[in-house]
Image (cartoon, rainbow, N blue to C red):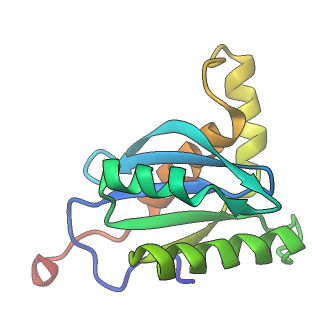
Amino acid sequence: MDVYPQKVRQPLTVLAFDFGTKRIGVAAGQSITGTAQALDLIPARDGIPDWTALEALVKIWQPDAFVVGLPFNMDDSESELTLRARKFGKRLEGRLHKPCFGIDERLTSFEARGEILRGNRDEAVDSIAARLILESWFAGLPAVTDDQQ
């Protein structure tokens, strides 16, 4: 799973996921503004998402791509959860026929909990983490060049 597309076109609508085995945080965003909004959680059973709920989100948002947060360990090694998040991304790509990109999501859940403590209590930690993942991905997205438009 690549981090960014080879060629970038604007605008991009993207759905991002903070993968978990019991619930999956979701956010939607737009590359023009580089911002995202947290959406409702997708329930999961042992890492398998409620595909019906996920497909409904895809139908509503019509994303151009997906981004999945990859939970690397602090020493840059991969955990079992990292491997499962990659597998989830591959399933998204294969099942929903949109490109999927993976990005390091270390400390996003920690930062999301901080937002909740600062008063953002209406959103779930996992969906706030998905929003942070997507905004981070947008921040690193290569600029569009004239030959890519």
Measured from the top left, where is residue 94 in percent x and y? Answer: 49, 82
For residue 110, side relative to residue 29 (left or right): right
User: In this view of the protein, can residue 79 be seen by the observer?
Assistant: no
Quarter of the image containing the N terminus? bottom right
Q: Which residue is drawn at 39% across and 56% down?
A: 58
Instruction: Give the quarter of the figure containing the C terminus.
Output: bottom left
Residue at x 79% of width, y 50% of height: 22
Residue 42: percent from left, percent from top: 62, 47
Q: In this view, does 123 lie above or below 38?
A: above
In the shown orientation, is residue 43 left or right of residue 34? right
Residue 52 visible in rendering: yes
Residue 148 on image: x %, y %: 16, 81
Horizontal side of 136 relative to 70 (left or right) equals: left
Residue 75 lies in quadrant: bottom right
Question: Which residue: 70% across, 58% down?
Answer: 19
**Relative height, residue 108 to residue 1 (above, below):** above
Nearest the eye: 143 or 45 = 45
Looking at this rendering, what residue extends furthest in the front direction?
A: 52
